[in-house]
Image (cartoon, rainbow, N blue to C red):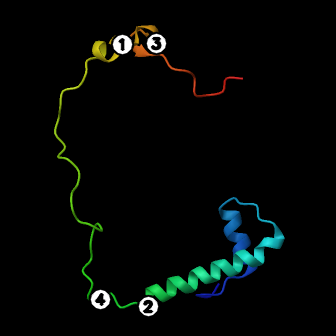
Amino acid sequence: MSSTTITTEDVEKFAHLARLRLQKKKLKRIREEFGSILKYVQQISAADTTKVKQKAHVDEINVLRTDSPQTSLSQQEALHNRSDSQKDGYFIIKSVFNND
């Protein structure tokens, strides 16, 4: 595979690695789309960024609160309003797994 040329075999290999089943009639269109994406990436990569200051984050503003310990509810307080859906100090919830 060259820098901008994607072959049908490349697309088939990508699909295999991604565990995708592609229809043979769509391979040409997907190959062309991959090629367009690679050409665009090469175009972006060619931009001179030597004078651009590297940033760790787009805004570089910490919008998060400081991480400080706070008191939380006791187990009894948390379960207080759920007397019908708790047992032995734990919440009772519907099963999320199919037990068929």
Q: Amino acid at mark 3?
A: Ser
Question: In front of the other: label 3 or label 2?
Answer: 3
> Which residue is tagged 3?
85
When the figure is inspected, residue 91 is found, relative to residue 4, above or below; the finding is above
Q: How far apart are labels 4 and 2 at the CA level?
A: 11 Å
Question: Where is residue 95 drawn, in percent x and y?
Answer: 57, 23
Residue extending farthest right: 25
Q: Which residue is mark 2?
A: 46
Query: Does label 4 or label 3 sit earlier along the sequence?
Result: 4
Quarter where residue 49 is shown:
bottom left
Lateral position of residue 56 relative to residue 13, left or right: left
For the N terminus, the image quarter is bottom right
Mark 4: few/some/many CA within 10 Å (<14, 14-19, 20+): few
Q: Real-space Cα distance between discs 3 and 2? A: 61 Å
Q: Which residue is mark 4?
A: 50
Q: Amino acid under label 2?
A: Ala
- Most foreground residue, 88 or 84: 84
Front disc: 1 or 4: 1
Q: CA distance from mark 1 to mark 4?
A: 60 Å
Q: Residues within 10 Å of mark 1 (few under 14, many from 20)?
A: few
Residue 81 marker: 1
- Where disc 3 sits, the SS reads helix
Distance from the alpha carbon under mark 2 to that under mark 1: 61 Å
Q: What type is the residue that disc 4 sits on?
A: Thr
Q: Residue at x 67, y 23 (%)?
A: 99
Answer with mark 1 or mark 4, whichever residue precedes in sequence. Answer: 4
Q: Considering the numbered disc 1 on the image, is that residue within a helix, a strand or a loop? A: helix
Specify the quadrant that holds the C terminus: top right
**Distance between the alpha carbons at the discs numbered 1 and 3:** 9 Å
Q: Residue 29: where, in percent of width, then height?
A: 74, 77
Crowd rating for badge 2 (residues with CA inside 10 Å; few <14, some 14–19, many 20+) = few
